[in-house]
Image: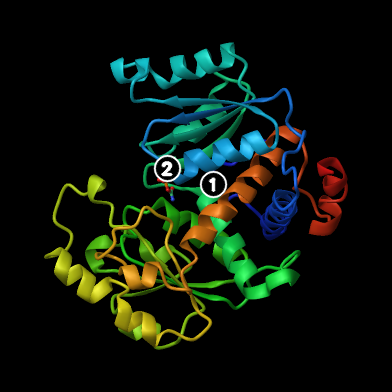
Amino acid sequence: MRHLLSTRDLSRDEAIGILDIAEDMADVAGRAVPKLPALRGRTVVNLFFEDSTRTRISFEAAAKLLSADVINFSAKGSIVSKGESLKDTAQTLAAIGADAVVIRHGASGAPQVLADSGWIDAAIVNAGDGTHEHPTQALLDAFTIRRRIHGAAARGRALDGVSVVIVGDILHSRVARSNVWLLTTLGARVEFVAPATLLPIGIGDWPVAVHHDLDAALVSKPDVVMMLRIQSERMHDSFFPSAHEYSREWGLGDDRLAALAPDSIVMHPGPMNRGLEISSGAADSPRSTVLEQVANGVSVRMAVLYLALSGNKLSGSESPGSKLSGTKEELA
Ligand code: CP
């Protein structure tokens, strides 16, 4: 795997392979000395043109746990805020010897431009681009679901038949897009629930069922309820009458939480708008995987950086197990 730009490009075997390597990385995290030498001498640049807490910090932790050198570059406070182009920024990073660039950008497609440009010879990892994709978020979400459902027997497994309801601001959500492609590739059944104003044009062509009534969607007792953040910073119009009405119609409050199946889980990519799309009771309940998702994000991002920088291939027709043969030895 040279770049990770989208989950749409991943085959089922490739996706399972990444999740399995993330399991190996999680095993390493349990050791007395969790650091691995795998990326010693390599430089990872975190190039963030948009704010981030979870993604930036976990990529930094992941790179350091693999012994890479890490440079954090925030557009705020850099020359980019004075108008430097992506090309000049990329060439500057090339000049300092970046081996991988983890990029978050407000423009959909910016990581693809960087990967295709020839401005820099580095692995490009999409850490969220506009409303397009956030592939490592979807991978950590799939990893979290797989662990909750399959437990210690998760390795090598997909998500066949798992029902996932994704609720809220689908229109602006790169998390929803990456999850749709990845979760359906892994065999899950995905439903969207949102007001009509927060669904993208062309949703009928996506491999999902679409509903507007959250209570009706929850009657089927889905395995996973994934709440999305209302992205006020991307809203230049009014998409629902009031926060109170949104919360009443599409929020996961304590009553809806109590009506879920006993073993169903509640997910949120963060940051959460408590009291809007999710109540504190739901966010902090034992069903909530919010903090597990953050912790799993480190293992998943270790796997992605390892694959992107080690030259390990996940494509081809071998079984996931054979594709990963040797990986554990390299990690030892
Ligand atoms: N889930 C997520 O992308 O969070 P951050 O914006 O904090 O990185």
Q: Is residue 167 left or right of residue 295?
A: left
Where is residue 26? Give x, y as percent.
69, 53
| Above or below 307: residue 85 | above
Q: Quadrant of residue 45?
A: top right
Q: Is residue 163 above or below residue 199?
A: below
Q: Earlier in the sequence, mark 1 or mark 2?
A: 1
SS under mark 2: loop
The residue identified by callout 2 is 53
Q: Farthest top residue?
A: 95
- Residue 319 visible? The answer is no
Residue position marked by numbered label 1 in the rendering: 6
Q: Which residue lies at the image location 75% right of the left edge and 38% below the top edge?
A: 36
Expressed as whole percent of the image width and height from the top left, the position of residue 215 reads 31, 83
Distance of mark 1 from mark 2, alpha carbons?
21 Å
Rendered residue at 60%/78% (across/down):
161
Residue 233: numbered disc: none
Label 2 CB less than 8 angstroms from ligand 1: yes
Q: Is residue 186 visible?
A: yes
Q: Residue at x 86, y 54 (%)?
A: 322
Judge from the rendering whether residue 267 lies leftward or rightward of residue 211; answer left or right.
right
